[in-house]
């Protein structure tokens, strides 16, 4: 079970390039942390702090965080609200599902004049009669309690009941203190009895350790536990043991080796190189006739001194801020012909390697890469010129087509000389001659043919044989 130290904070401050002095937000949730510490030493400019889902039993060591505005402590083992008077900028406090028994402790937040939101849902204190009325009156700066807005009328009614509620809560506090003292006295006597008992022989201890772990695993899965801070802490430590982690007790919190990270496996048992990408980095291979290039997307805010590259003939390893990227190379490369570059704009890392089959006769990988880039730029320019020429030809064709359409004389589309010959041929057909004669009349005016349409007459309409004239139907025109 880890503690809050510099290493953990830097690991959780990757979004700020690992810088702690200017860190404004940090997420430390679900680490089973038992104590709040070192934040006042490394992160004094914190504004947002997430500590939900841990095993914290006391609010402490936050008095130097003057800019802290949001503190998230849900799902912990906190019994008393305390030690937040110096957090001058605190505006939101979340203590959902903790073990706060008496709402009288919220009076310690009177000095936090900017506190506008407070969450105590899931705490035993919310089941006490007069809980909401007491908190609303004790903290007049609050605007929301447990996600519900505090109205002015509610505050007036609560202030009338406040004295009686406070007196009742003070009596309850004294009773709780007496019970806690009796519980502590019982625990002390039990510990003294255990110390006075003779120590058992160490023989067979290794065998019993495995049996105890199996029994504890079975008990953890089958036996229900009470919802108390002690039971939560014990369950978290048992779960850490089952996962093979070292449990950090209160006496071990100063030990930096309390939780040692396992060494990564980089090679198989038969000597094969295993590929690994611990940082989930995006990468891309690019191959040319003489070189192979690996491009890795890295944050531009990461300092280049935190990157280490190790190239072998058939594989390479890149360590980026302690995270390993190990990959196999498709073709064998020349280890002396390697150049590493980093983009100032995007932070991308480019590793160019000279192929071993092409390394003979080549003076320098930089010169080979320069020639390849020159050839690539020349090919790109040639392709761009070819595309521009094709666009120019298409534009010329379209311009010629438009010009032809502009010069087209729609008035002389019909050849009237042929039409006159057709009329002469159809002269013997009176029904056709009459229809054509009434459709259009051609006049020659200044070398151009003017076409006009004549008005349709009744004789042009030839009804069908089965047509019946219905006088009730109005005419169409």
Image (spheres, grey):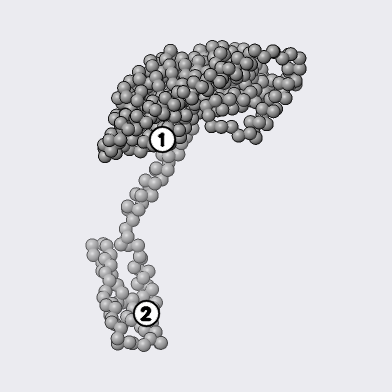
Q: Taking 85 as reference, is 183 left or right?
A: right
Task: Name the residue that disc number 1 marks.
Answer: 128
Q: Quadrant of residue 146?
A: top left
Q: Quadrant of residue 346?
A: top left
- Residue at horizontal 30%, vertical 62%? 411
In the picture as drawn, the residue positioned furthest to the left comes out as: 446
Q: Taking 197 as reference, is 3 left or right?
A: left
Work out whether residue 372 or residue 5 is closer to the camera in this orientation and state it. Answer: 5
Q: Taking 407 as reference, is 383 left or right?
A: right
Work out whether residue 323 or residue 286 is closer to the camera in this orientation and state it. Answer: 323
- Residue at horizontal 53%, vertical 19%? 185
- Residue at horizontal 37%, vertical 69%? 418
Task: Name the residue that disc number 2 marks.
Answer: 432
Q: Position of residue 369 (x, y in %)?
A: 55, 19
Work out how far the residue at label 1 is from the one at label 2, CA to CA, in angstroms: 108 Å
- Residue at horizontal 26%, vertical 75%? 455
Callout 1: SS: loop
Q: Position of residue 113 (x, y in %)?
A: 30, 25
């Amino acid at each position: 079970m880890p503690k809050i130290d510099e290493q953990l904070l830097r690991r959780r401050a990757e979004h700020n390039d690992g810088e702690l002095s200017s860190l404004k937000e940090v997420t430390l949730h679900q680490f089973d942390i038992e104590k709040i510490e070192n934040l006042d030493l490394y992160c004094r400019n914190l504004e947002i702090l997430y500590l939900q889902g841990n095993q914290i039993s006391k609010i402490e060591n936050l008095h130097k965080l003057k800019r802290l505005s949001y503190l998230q402590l849900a799902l912990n083992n906190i019994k008393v609200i305390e030690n937040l008077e110096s957090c001058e900028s605190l505006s939101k406090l979340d203590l959902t599902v903790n073990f706060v028994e008496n709402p009288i402790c919220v009076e310690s937040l009177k000095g936090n004049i900017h506190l506008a939101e407070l969450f105590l849902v899931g705490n035993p204190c919310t089941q006490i009669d007069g809980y909401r009325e007491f908190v609303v009156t004790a903290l007049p700066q609050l605007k929301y309690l447990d996600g519900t807005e505090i109205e002015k009328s509610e505050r007036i009614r609560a202030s009338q009941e406040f004295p009686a509620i406070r007196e009742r809560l003070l009596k309850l506090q004294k009773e709780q203190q007496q019970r806690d003292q009796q519980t502590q006295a019982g625990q002390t006597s039990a510990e003294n009895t255990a110390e006075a008992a003779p120590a058992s022989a160490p023989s067979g201890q290794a065998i019993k350790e495995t049996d105890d772990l199996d029994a504890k695993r079975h008990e953890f899965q089958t036996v229900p536990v009470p919802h108390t801070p002690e039971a939560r802490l014990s369950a978290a430590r048992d779960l850490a043991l089952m996962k093979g982690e070292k449990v950090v007790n209160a006496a071990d919190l100063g030990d930096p080796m309390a939780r040692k990270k396992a060494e990564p496996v980089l090679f198989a048992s038969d000597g094969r190189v295993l590929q690994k990408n611990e940082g989930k980095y995006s990468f891309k291979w690019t191959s040319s006739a003489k070189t192979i290039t690996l491009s890795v997307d890295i944050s531009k805010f990461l300092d280049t001194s935190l990157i280490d590259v190790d190239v072998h003939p058939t594989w390479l390893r890149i360590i980026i801020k302690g995270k390993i990227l190990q990959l196999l190379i498709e073709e064998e490369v020349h280890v002396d012909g390697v150049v590493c570059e980093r983009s100032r704009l995007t932070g991308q890392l480019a590793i160019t390697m000279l192929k071993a089959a092409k390394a003979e006769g080549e003076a320098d990988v930089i010169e080979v890469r320069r020639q390849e880039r020159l050839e690539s730029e020349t090919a790109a320019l040639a392709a761009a010129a070819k595309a521009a020429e094709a666009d120019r030809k298409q534009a010329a064709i379209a311009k010629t087509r438009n010009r032809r359409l502009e010069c087209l004389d729609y008035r002389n589309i019909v050849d009237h000389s042929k039409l006159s010959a057709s009329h002469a041929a159809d002269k013997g057909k009176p029904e056709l001659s009459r229809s054509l004669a009434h459709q259009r009349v051609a006049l020659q005016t200044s070398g151009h043919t003017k076409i006009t349409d004549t008005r349709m007459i009744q004789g042009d309409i030839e009804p069908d044989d089965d047509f019946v004239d219905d006088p009730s139907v109005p005419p169409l025109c």
